[in-house]
Amino acid sequence: MTAGSPKEVVRRVADGILEATVIGSFTEIGPMVRSRLFGWDPPDRLDGRVVVITGGTSGIGRAMAEGAFERGATVELIGRNAERGFGIVAAMTAGLAAGQPAPRFRRCDIGDLDDVGALAADLMADHPQIDVLAHVAGAIVAERTESAQGIEATWASMVVGPFLLTELLRPRLGRAAPGRVIWMTSGGMYLRSHSDDEQWLDRPYNGTFAYAEAKRAQVDLVAEFARQWPADEVVSHATHPGWVDTPGVTEQLAAFSKVMGPILRTPAHGADTALWLAAAPEALDHSGELWLDRQIRSDVRVPGTHTSDLDRARLWAKVAQQAHSGGAA
């Protein structure tokens, strides 16, 4: 169907109306309508591909891991909770298809840079090529705490650790020509702008705001990865899942969960675009973009929250210094 055909115009207008309403876009209404509007097919198969997923033991990360496994991928499940991780892998292995490599759980605290270095070394030792790296790990931290390297915990686990892991795995991702790196951000990032006080040393700590600012930084870093790394080596994507019914939302945003619960997305719908980006040929035509429901979206909804190219470059330099010096810049 051509881009300017009447039917396609109607689809785009309807999608735009959903996006403008926020509730119609971010809730379960979004994928229910858009899947029919655009005639979504299930995400493509991932046979023979190695998919590494952080935060894979709960919620969206678990749904993505299970979806990738069902599509034939060799799944590397990364998380902090070993008991839960090995349990998930055991359940997945029970449905192992003939000839499919078994999924594997590896314990790692993504906020601990020593853990990240060890994880990267182990993954590279076991896999000559890594096709997909998905950064899903993250949580709201109620009180300011620091990582083993002295970095604010939210920033360490959602920005610095993932950045370091991506850089360390670059040789293996590049062999996929291109590898795909997918950052699971959050719609909450729309409400916050870039801040130079990412360590929360000069203002009262707010865990929800720290989370949202880290998610904003993820989107900004994706744009910088796309600018600095050749697209025939690695493509970088950010996707936000909408509002999803996960254990994290129930525990950390109880009032929101209680009010919105009936129309929150399922974890599978929250993971759909990430799975689609992991497999779809169309995803290789773009790098550095933010996606929701298989469409590129603006990274700005609120005036004053746009990050300039200069601030993105400064952010990259700061995070790189934190990642490689092993501490707060």
Image: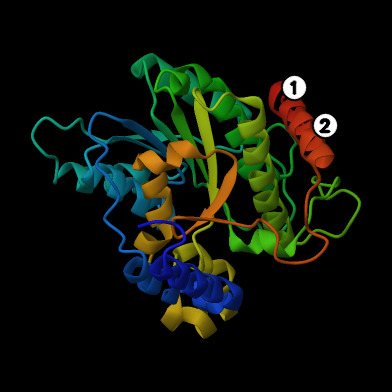
The one of 229 and 99 positioned closer to us in this rendering: 229
* Res 11 quadrant in image: bottom left
Q: CA distance from mark 1 to mark 2?
A: 8 Å
Q: Position of residue 177 (x, y in %)?
A: 42, 22
> Residue at (42%, 74%) from the top-left corner?
28
* Res 35 quadrant in image: bottom left
The one of 77 and 190 positioned closer to us in this rendering: 190
Q: Secondary structure at mark 2?
A: loop
Q: Position of residue 187 (x, y in %)?
A: 60, 62
- Is residue 159 positioned above or below 178 on the image? below
Total numbered labels placed on residues in the image: 2
Q: Is residue 71 visible?
A: yes
Q: Name the disc covering residue 173, or none.
A: none
Mark 1 and 2 residues: CB-CB less than 8 Å, in contact?
yes
Kind of residue at disc 1:
Ser
Quarter of the image for the C terminus: give it: top right
* Res 167 quadrant in image: top right
Give the residue pinned by disc 1: 325
Give the residue pinned by disc 2: 329
Kind of residue at disc 2:
Ala
Specify the farthest residue to the right: 202
Q: Position of residue 53 (x, y in %)?
A: 42, 40
